């Protein structure tokens, strides 16, 4: 590469490249022939590793990182191929087109955002899509926010213009605001407001539509146990999703605990009897 302000892909050289185990196609794609190989130069390598990093070579000789050409991102310690999430979305009924990006929706909190174009009616589409993704992808690969668009923005080359995609409005839920009524609902609303860092949460608001993700869900469950003494499985927040339903679940668990206590039993002892 000659010094320029144009964009370049980074390649690494080395004395030996074993490649990927049992993945010949990926090895051929990533480890490419070096057109500048010099057999007389001990520092020269026959092959180069195509990193996928997109950089710009500045006039002073330094490389400025721009992004990834394969759209691989790292979210809360997990490496995620955005194409895998988009493929799962393409298999979901009601989704005509989609694109997934990683973006900071809060300072220092990078999340996956899915932009959807509905093939027909949009009613309940996001809920359907989220359930579909939870069935076929790990929790950390399910986007934290979904945005419905009439069409995906395109650049002059006819490709999706990811930079033109709007920011999600995680402060606004699709549900009409309903204030908490029971003591359990009030506790949960306060916890959600604290963890999600938003001013107001209603009992029909969806945790994930408000920008929640698996890491935040774990914080919510930790605070919930500290306040109520009840431990909620992580899967329940993905299943129930609203304050109202989770409050009902907690109230039912409290009722069971109180009933067992009045009989001089514990939930653990009851589970053992059932297993026997």
Image (cartoon, helix red, strand yellow):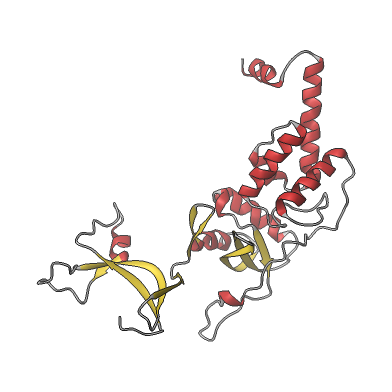
Q: Could you tell me how many numbered marks the image carries?
A: 0
**Residue at 24 percent of width and 56 percent of height:** 18
> Which quarter of the rendering shows the N terminus?
bottom left
Relative vertical location of residue 103 with respect to residue 158 in this rendering, above or below: above
Considering only vertical position in the picture, is 156 above or below 239? Answer: below
Q: Is residue 12 above or below residue 189?
A: below
Query: Residue 53: x, y in percent?
Result: 40, 69
Q: Position of residue 4 (x, y in %)?
A: 37, 85
Q: Is 213 or 105 nearer to us in this picture?
A: 105
Give the side of residue 264 with respect to residue 68, left or right: right
Q: Residue at x 62, y 69 (%)?
A: 96
Residue for point 87% across, 53% down: 178
Q: Residue at x 72, y 18 (%)?
A: 266
Compare residues 56 and 169 and report the one nearer the observer: 56
Residue 223 sits in quarter: top right
User: Which image quarter: residue 160?
Assistant: bottom right
* Image location (x, y in percent) of residue 146: 66, 62
Most foreground residue, 113 or 224: 224
Q: Is residue 175 left or right of residue 222?
A: right
Q: Residue furthest top?
A: 264
Q: Is residue 32 left or right of residue 230?
A: left
Q: Is residue 44 above or below residue 239?
A: below
Residue 258 at x, y = what percent?
81, 22
Image side of residue 105 versus residue 77, left or right:
right
Q: Quadrant of the C terminus?
A: top right
């Amino acid at each position: 590469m000659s010094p320029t302000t144009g964009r370049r892909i980074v390649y690494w050289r080395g004395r030996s490249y074993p490649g990927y185990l049992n993945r010949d196609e990926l090895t051929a794609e990533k480890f490419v022939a070096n057109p500048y190989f010099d057999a007389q130069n001990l520092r020269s390598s026959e092959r180069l590793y195509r990193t996928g990093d997109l950089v710009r070579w500045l006039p002073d000789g330094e490389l400025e990182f721009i992004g990834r050409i394969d759209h691989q991102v790292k979210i809360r310690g997990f490496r995620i191929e955005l194409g895998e999430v988009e493929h799962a979305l393409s298999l979901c009924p009601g989704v005509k087109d989609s694109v997934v990006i990683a973006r900071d929706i809060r300072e220092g909190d990078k999340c996956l955002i899915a932009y959807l174009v509905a093939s027909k009616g949009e009613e309940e589409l996001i809920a359907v899509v989220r359930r579909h993704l939870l069935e076929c992808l790990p929790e950390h690969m399910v986007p934290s926010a979904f945005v419905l668009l009439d069409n995906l923005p395109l650049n002059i080359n006819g490709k999706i213009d990811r930079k033109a995609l709007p920011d999600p409005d995680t402060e606004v839920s699709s549900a009409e605001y309903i204030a908490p009524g029971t003591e359990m609902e009030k506790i949960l609303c306060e916890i959600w407001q604290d963890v999600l860092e938003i001013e107001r949460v209603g009992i029909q608001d969806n945790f994930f539509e408000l920008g929640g993700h698996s890491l935040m869900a774990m914080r919510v469950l930790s605070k919930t146990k500290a306040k109520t003494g009840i431990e909620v499985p992580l899967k329940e927040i993905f299943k129930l999703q609203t304050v109202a339903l989770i409050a009902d679940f907690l109230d039912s668990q409290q009722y069971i605990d109180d009933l067992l206590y009045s009989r001089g039993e514990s939930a653990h002892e009851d589970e053992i009897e059932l297993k026997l």
